[in-house]
Image (tube, rainbow, N blue to C red):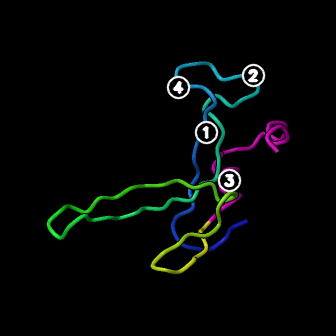
Amino acid sequence: MVISGLNGALVGVRRSVPVGYPPPRLEPTYGYRVRVTSIIDFTRVSARAPVEARLRLINPRRRDRVEFDGQSLPLAANFSAPLLSYSHLNELWLGFIT
């Protein structure tokens, strides 16, 4: 399912253990792929100061709108992107993660 909106829909990787440690049993080696929505906030303290950018990653299941220029706008989300990011799917593994 794809929801149109503001910002970018991405695929993130969530690991339950730090890099270099073996994953728990039945967890994928490189972590779980999850859907995220990216927001970039730009700020400038003064006219002479450089523009600062901050990247935020948001779980679209927890938040579906964002305030922008005094308006509440919908966030973009692609809930099928994590599954589609795999080159091939193993039906048994797909059953475990769903």
- Disc 3 marks which residue? 84
Q: Is residue 22 above or below residue 57?
A: above
The numbered dot on residue 25 is: 2
Dot 4 or dot 1: first in sequence order is: 1
Dot 4 or dot 3: first in sequence order is: 4
User: Badge 2: how crowded within 10 Å, few (<14), some, or many (20+)?
Assistant: few
Q: Is residue 39 above or below residue 12?
A: below
Q: Is residue 23 left or right of residue 47?
A: right
Dot 2 or dot 3: first in sequence order is: 2
Distance from Cα at disc 2 to Cα at disc 3: 23 Å
Q: Is residue 79 left or right of residue 74?
A: right
- Disc 4 marks which residue? 19
- The residue shown at (68%, 53%) is 84
Instruction: Report helix, strand or loop for mark 3.
Output: helix
**Closest to the observer, 83 or 90:** 83
Distance from Cα at disc 2 to Cα at disc 4: 16 Å
Instruction: Report helix, strand or loop for mark 1.
Output: strand
* Contact (Cβ within 8 Å) of mark 2 with mark 4: no
Query: Which image quadrant: the C terminus?
Result: top right
Instruction: Report helix, strand or loop for mark 4.
Output: loop
Distance from Cα at disc 4 to Cα at disc 1: 11 Å
Q: Which of the two discs, 2 and 3, sits closer to the camera? A: 2
Q: Position of residue 89 (x, y in %)?
A: 74, 43
Amino acid type of disc 3?
Leu
Amino acid type of disc 1?
Arg
- Disc 1 marks which residue? 14
Instruction: Report helix, strand or loop for mark 2.
Output: loop
Boundaries of the magenta span: 77-98
Q: Is residue 84 magenta?
A: yes
Distance from Cα at disc 4 to Cα at disc 3: 24 Å
Dot 2 or dot 4: first in sequence order is: 4
User: Badge 3: how crowded within 10 Å, few (<14), some, or many (20+)?
Assistant: few
